[in-house]
Amino acid sequence: MKAPALEALKQIALRGGLGSAAVLSSRDLGTLLGVSQQAASLRILELLEAGLITRDVGGRQQRLQLTAKGGEALRREYAEYRRLFEVAEPLTVEGTVTTGLGEGAFYMRQEGYRSQFRQKLGFEPFSGTLNLRVEGRDRTTLELLRSLEGVPIEEFKSGGRTYGGAKCFPATLRGTSCAVILPLRTHHEDILEVISATNLREALGLKDGNVVELHIGKPAG
Amino acid sequence: MKAPALEALKQIALRGGLGSAAVLSSRDLGTLLGVSQQAASLRILELLEAGLITRDVGGRQQRLQLTAKGGEALRREYAEYRRLFEVAEPLTVEGTVTTGLGEGAFYMRQEGYRSQFRQKLGFEPFSGTLNLRVEGRDRTTLELLRSLEGVPIEEFKSGGRTYGGAKCFPATLRGTSCAVILPLRTHHEDILEVISATNLREALGLKDGNVVELHIGKPAG
DNA sequence: ATTACTAAAACTCGAGTAA
DNA sequence: TTTACTCGAGTTTTAGTAA
């Protein structure tokens, strides 16, 4: 997609075309873009052709609205900017301590994972995970983490079944170094699993409902 | 600024040119942008000309780095995308209490402003402003605010001079309701001015260097 | 008032190439 | 290898104008 078209798409979205229809003449769009009415008219035709917007030319005032495809195009662009500004600095996530189903501990006992943690994170993990529930705007940060590379944990087979891959992000929790682990095939839950060399719950005296800040340091792109 | 130049600036930033220098030949930049080496070379010259990047052509490998101006340009763009996808939730900004030059207090004594605050914000403002310095990633939120409408404060004339317009955003600071005021003709400083019915500095016992969280509630698009 | 066509001007691009 | 110039081809833009 060409840059001028994306710019036009963004302006239509800013004028309300993302969730609803934006009333926007080609002259006004031209003014917003700093080009002529004719050029803006062309932009609109291009966007229609590419299936990024729909139009309703009701005599006097045309109404422009982004399609799902158009919204996705903007979201991809947005993700690049987020990567630029949110990843450059350490990420902080606030989470509420919760008790999981115990599967975390089951996976943490598998040697196929343990050896990778030793090698790639540099510590022998305690055989249990600390589950943090993430809420509100911090969920955006969780989504961002999912889009980053992190430290790859490879999948492996053992005892006739496959253990899926994951990615880790070194972090600190109340000064204790640890790591966030995200399964590659995630269910997009709002839960962060934290592993550490020690039993974080005991070492830090954490109870269900406690709110903690997790600092995720400079993850790789 | 033209869209292709912005695109090039973004790619340089994504390759590490935001905080540090990106090693990036014009051929590689061309590949990233989907244009020829020659066109990418032109882009670089344009960005240098506009003062958005600096370059260090050390023989074999040129190093490109964004200037403060270049970083700001990207941040403004980012703010527009955030406006599209994130405005639904209340904004939180962290700021450090600082002492300004006292012009804030001068403006706050002008009846032309005071009457508008009474009418539009519903309180009689204390004749002084609390200056908060905003740093790091929160500067993006400041840009986002600048791109929003807020409560308009009209310009007016008095005593032979013109007092410029501004916009306000109702907010709370440590539970005390207040408002952020942004001049329309801003110098893009990293300072937020906060007004309130009370002397916030005294009422909350704030001193220079104290860090406070400002919650800006659901600003209008 | 709109949108959008035509034609010409103005740009931008990439090939060739120099340094 | 680099970067970046010239120049012709192709593309985009705008003014004029129709519908």
Image (cartoon, coloured by chain):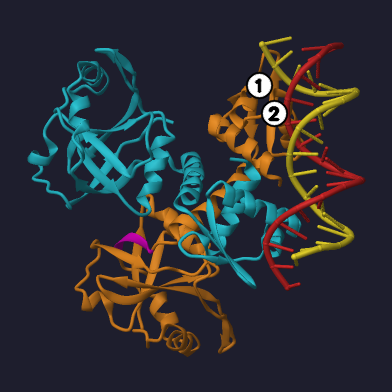
Chain colours: A orange, B cyan, C yellow, D red
Q: Which residue is mark 1?
A: A27
Q: Which residues are magenta?
A: A90-97
Q: Which residue is mark 2?
A: A40
Kindly identify the residue that appears in the image at 22 percent across and 78 percent down.
A202
Q: Is residue B70 above or below residue A5?
A: below
Measured Cα–Cα span from mark 1 to mark 2: 7 Å
Q: Are marks 1 and 2 in contact (CB under 8 Å)?
A: yes
Q: Mark 1 vs mark 2: which is more N-terminal?
A: 1
> From the viewer's perspective, is C13 left or right of A34?
right
Instruction: Name the amino acid type tagged 1.
Output: Arg
**So how many labels did they put on this image?**
2
**Do tags 1 and 2 sit on the same chain?**
yes
Query: Which percent across, then down, holds residue A200?
Result: 27, 76
Residue A192 is a magenta residue: no
Q: Main secondary structure of the magenta part?
A: strand
Does residue B14 appear in the picture of this structure? yes
Kindly identify the residue that appears in the image at 31 percent across and 36 percent down.
B217
Which labelled disc corresponds to residue B48?
none
> From the viewer's perspective, is B86 left or right of D14?
left
Instruction: Name the amino acid type tagged 2.
Output: Ala
Kindly identify the residue that appears in the image at 58 percent across and 58 percent down.
B12
Query: Which percent across, then down, holds residue B73?
Result: 50, 45
> From the viewer's perspective, is D15 left or right of A72?
right
Few, some or many residues within 10 Å of mark 1 (<14, 14–19, 20+): some
Q: Chain letter for mark 1, please.
A: A
Q: Secondary structure at mark 1?
A: helix
The picture quadrant where one finds residue A62 is top right
Q: Chain letter for mark 2, please.
A: A
